[in-house]
Image (tube, rainbow, N blue to C red):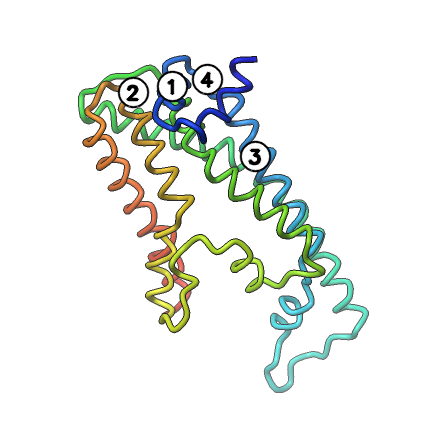
Amino acid sequence: MTSLVQPARIFVDPFEGTRAAVEGRRWLWPLLILAFCVTVSGIAYALRWDATAAVVGALPTEVGAPSVSESDIADQIQTASRKALVGGIAKGLLLMPLEVLLLACVLWVTAWLFSKPASFGQLMAAAAVAMLPIALYHLIFAVCAGFQHSLTDLRAERLVPSSLALLDGLSPKLQRVLRGVDFFNLWSVGLLGVGFSTATGMRLGRALLLTLVLYIMYAGIVFIRIPTLGGP
């Protein structure tokens, strides 16, 4: 019962809750909660997503391009919806556990580089607990999506406004930069710093600064570098 209640304590008392979870190596329930919330979010999105705009926008528009019948378009819309559903489920059940495992590995390497050895179980708990704000985001998204008649890609991005990228009047490049300034992501960074400090014995301020630097590197790759590979 203690392990089940522990994740809820993170939101009430993040410092002591995170420390207790890391010291007790309690990573299973946070991981299950994350997988469940992300899976529910993916299903809710797929059931409300209107794939028509995405499919029609991808159709060839060049002169001389073969025409596409309405039945083919309908089949493509149905296929896109099914792919979104399968992708949402796979993200929750497969991708999220892999991300937590990868994050724990990154923490282990970081601890080794700074000569702060820690057990992998504690680092796994720190990674899983740090993802609980992300689970909360997906739970809120799932509830909001459930009240929508339909969702477009743009509507889905703005359904739970949590980053500065949603401010009006921003250039595309600035939007990519400000996507990293996200409430739930920064909340996760803070929990990760507390968990890393507990697992390694590193001073809390130093651990928070270290995890913030790691997040900035991650945001630079995911939010800035990768999108620019497709164009300006």
Q: Earlier in the sequence, mark 2 or mark 4?
A: 4
Find disc 4 in the rendering and name its residue: 26
Instruction: State the residue at coordinates (36%, 71%).
Output: 171
Q: Earlier in the sequence, mark 4 or mark 3?
A: 4
Q: Are marks 2 and 1 in contact (CB under 8 Å)?
A: yes
In the image, residue 159 sits, relative to residue 169, either above or below, namely above
Residue 94 is tagged as 3
Q: CA distance from mark 4 to mark 1?
A: 6 Å
Q: Earlier in the sequence, mark 2 or mark 1?
A: 1
Three-letter amino acid code at disc 1?
Answer: Val
Identify the amino acid type marked 2.
Answer: Thr
- Of 231 and 24, which appears nearest the observer? 24
Spatial CA span between label 4 and label 3 = 20 Å
Question: Label 1: which residue?
Answer: 22
Please state which amino acid type lies under the numbered disc 3.
Answer: Leu
Residue at image mark 2? 198
Q: Is residue 215 above or below residue 84?
A: above
In this image, 199 relative to 85: left or right? left
Disc 3 or disc 1, which is closer to the eye? 1
Mark 3 neighbour density, 10 Å: few (under 14) some (14–19) many (20 or more): few
Residue 163, can we see it?
yes
